[in-house]
Amino acid sequence: MVASTVVSNQSPVISLEEWMENPPVATEWVGGELLEKNGMTLKHSRIQSKLSFYWRSYKDSSGQGGEVYTEVPCRTNKQGRSPDVAYLTPELVAQYGDAKVLPQSFPLSAEIVSPTDLAEDVIAKAQEYLLSGGAEVWLVFPESRWIIVTTQTKRLVFVSGEIVSTQSVLPGFNVAVDELLA
């Protein structure tokens, strides 16, 4: 996740429905306001790219299908979000693959936490995804070298020296924490 700031007062105010029709690049619609996602660092971008590559390679090699996206818009129960990395199952690709915005959370989402993000906000975002149709959320903390994997029923923490694995989506996927965060 990259830190968000409110778009300047000179930007037009739009509704969630308008955001869903044409979401501006690198924005989220949160609490009635259009927020710009900013704070992307080289490290953040590298981890996002690696995780996207690893999930994509695994879904292809395992034959599970579906699609992997980066910075793609979805609607939660009350807001418009854009997870850093997201996986959509083959069934949902068939149903929503051509939509401008996924009308629910992705089954598997990842947020890469930037140094300016607040822990409470990141945890609330993970809960928001889970309450809006998501099954699993990865919160990646590059500086502390932690990855928190949360589902409807459990929360697991993986640290340097361990292997992180999916819990309910993309069964069988795993990667060394150090490899992903290197």
Image (cartoon, rainbow, N blue to C red):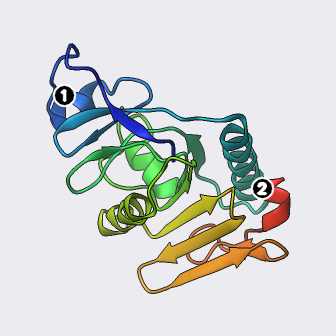
Q: Nearer the viewer, residue 89 or 179?
A: 179
Crowd band around label 1 with a 10 angstrom C-alpha radius: few (<14), some (14–19), many (20+): few
Residue found 56% across the figure and 62% down from its top: 139
Viewer-proximal residue, 93 or 176? 176
User: Can residue 172 be seen?
Assistant: no
User: On the rendered structure, is 152 left or right of 150?
Assistant: left
Going by the numbered disc 2, the residue's amino acid type is Leu
Left or right, 104 with reference to 71 = left
For marks 2 and 1, the one nearer the N-term is 1
State if disc 1 and disc 2 touch (CB < 8 Å). no
The structure residue drawn at horizontal position 57% and vertical position 73%, both measured from the top left corner, is: 149
x then y, percent, for residue 148 = 58, 71
Distance from disc 2 to disc 1, alpha carbons, whole Å, reads 36 Å
Q: Which residue is mark 1?
A: 18
Total numbered labels = 2
What residue do we see at 44% from left, 59% from top?
A: 122
In this rendering, the label closer to the viewer, 2 or 1 = 2
Q: Residue 160 location, x and y as percent?
A: 80, 71
In the image, residue 116 lies at what x, y percent?
A: 51, 46
Q: Name the kind of residue labelled 1 in the image.
A: Glu
| Direction from residue 47 to residue 77 in the image, left or right | left
Q: Nearer the viewer, residue 128 or 166?
A: 128
Residue at the extreme bottom of the image, as rendered: 153
- Left or right: residue 170 compared with residue 126: right
- Spot occupied by residue 138 in the image (x, y as percentages of width and height): 56, 64
**Residue located beneath label 2 in the image:** 181
Instruction: Assess disc 2: are there few (<14), some (14-19) or many (≥20) residues with their C-alpha within 10 Å of its C-alpha.
Output: many
Residue 128, placed above or below residue 33? below
Mark 1, secondary structure of its residue: helix
Please, what secondary structure does the residue beneath circle 2 have? helix
